[in-house]
């Protein structure tokens, strides 16, 4: 009794074709032809399951991949600290870029968020270096 | 390409460096009084314009805070004292960015960052108005 082999699990394509047969609609083509328009670029195409190329399954997955991808570093702490302690103007620019990281991430533009993150880091470094330089320039005045 | 365990190791090292630097800074600002000790970094913005930038008074405020004098710290730089817990929260979120993804995304909300920016700029303008 127990040594009965369970029937093989049909693949998704087979199930689709079975349903199509039963419902009397033409079955889907096995491989979808080239899509007429470029679909919206997924933020991380390698994150989604590559085996599932069925367009009927892809549409409701996009928000999930967005949320699973962690936000690129906004460097907000460093921006704020650089603004307050180092140099005002580059620090403010860094905060603006931090904000841009976050808003682009929420808009689904992961690549743009990464670029904004790099820019924020550059402006934090500029702010830090300017603060350092101003301190060094001030150094001789301390002895006067 | 990545050596397994390397990321964790470098995270531990950077955490140790950050703690050591913070401890050194605290020790320095505990013993050095910025209002009497001459050899302290000065604010370039204040030296050039005579106006107070949003961070002016931070060194004196930190010195006062380390001596437990919150009133004096608030007098030197109110924004710093008020924002210190929030900055600690931001730093926590930044350190645990990889593991606490949701918290990080929630704190680094565009609205929150815009509020921070506006508060800093408003404080920089407001403290130079002849109200105080």
Image (cartoon, rainbow, N blue to C red):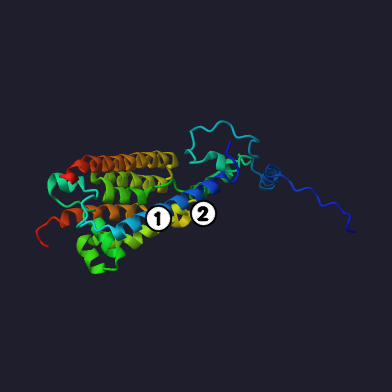
Q: Give the x, y percent position of residue B108.
A: 38, 53
**Picture layout, residue B1 above or below residue B45:** above
Res. B37 visible in picture: yes
Q: Element type at marker 2?
A: loop
Q: Kindly check if marks 1 and 2 are in contact, taking CB atoms under 8 A apart as contact.
A: no
Farthest residue to the front: give it.
Answer: A143
The total of numbered circles placed on residues is 2
On screen, residue B42 versus residue B86, left or right, reads left
Residue at x-position 47% and y-position 49%: B14
Q: Give the x, y percent position of residue B114.
A: 29, 52
Front-lying residue, A13 or A118: A118
On screen, residue A16 versus residue A34, left or right, reads right
Res. A63 visible in picture: no
Q: Which residue is denoted by mark 2 in the rendering? A: B99
Front-lying residue, B132 or A57: B132
On screen, residue A120 versus residue A13, left or right, reads left
Circle nearer the viewer, 1 or 2: 1
Picture quarter containing residue B109?
Answer: bottom left
Q: Element type at marker 1?
A: helix
Sequence order check, earlier mark of 1 and 2:
1
Farthest residue to the left: give it.
Answer: B130
Residue at x-position 32% and y-position 51%: A81
Q: Which residue is denoted by mark 1 in the rendering? A: B91
**How busy is the neighbourhood of tag 2: few (under 14 within 10 Å), some, or many (20 plus)?**
few
Q: Give the x, y percent position of residue A61.
A: 54, 48
């Amino acid at each position: 009794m127990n040594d009965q082999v369970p029937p093989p699990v049909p693949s998704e394509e087979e199930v689709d074709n079975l349903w199509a047969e039963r419902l009397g609609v033409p079955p889907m083509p096995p491989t979808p032809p080239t899509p007429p328009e470029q679909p919206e670029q997924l933020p991380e195409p390698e994150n989604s399951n590559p085996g599932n190329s069925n367009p009927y399954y892809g549409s409701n997955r996009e928000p999930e991949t967005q949320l699973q991808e962690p936000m690129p570093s906004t460097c907000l702490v460093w921006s704020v600290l650089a603004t307050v302690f180092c140099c005002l103007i580059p620090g403010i620019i860094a905060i603006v870029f931090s904000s841009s990281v976050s808003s682009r991430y929420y808009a689904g533009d992961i690549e743009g968020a990464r670029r904004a993150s790099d820019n924020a880091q550059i402006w934090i470094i500029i702010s830090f270096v300017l603060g350092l330089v101003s301190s060094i320039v001030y150094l001789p005045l301390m002895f006067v | 390409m990545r050596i397994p365990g390397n990321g964790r190791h470098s995270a531990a090292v950077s955490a140790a460096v950050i703690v050591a630097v913070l401890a050194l800074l605290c020790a320095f600002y505990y013993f050095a009084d910025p209002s009497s000790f001459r050899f302290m970094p000065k604010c370039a913005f204040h030296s050039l314009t005579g106006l107070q930038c949003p961070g002016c008074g931070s060194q004196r405020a930190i010195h006062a805070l380390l001596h437990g004098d919150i009133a004096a710290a608030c007098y030197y730089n109110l924004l710093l004292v008020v924002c210190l817990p929030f900055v600690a929260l931001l730093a926590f979120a930044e350190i645990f960015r990889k593991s606490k993804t949701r918290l990080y995304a929630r704190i680094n909300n565009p609205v929150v960052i815009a509020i921070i920016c506006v508060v800093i700029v408003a404080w920089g303008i407001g403290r130079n108005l002849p109200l105080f």
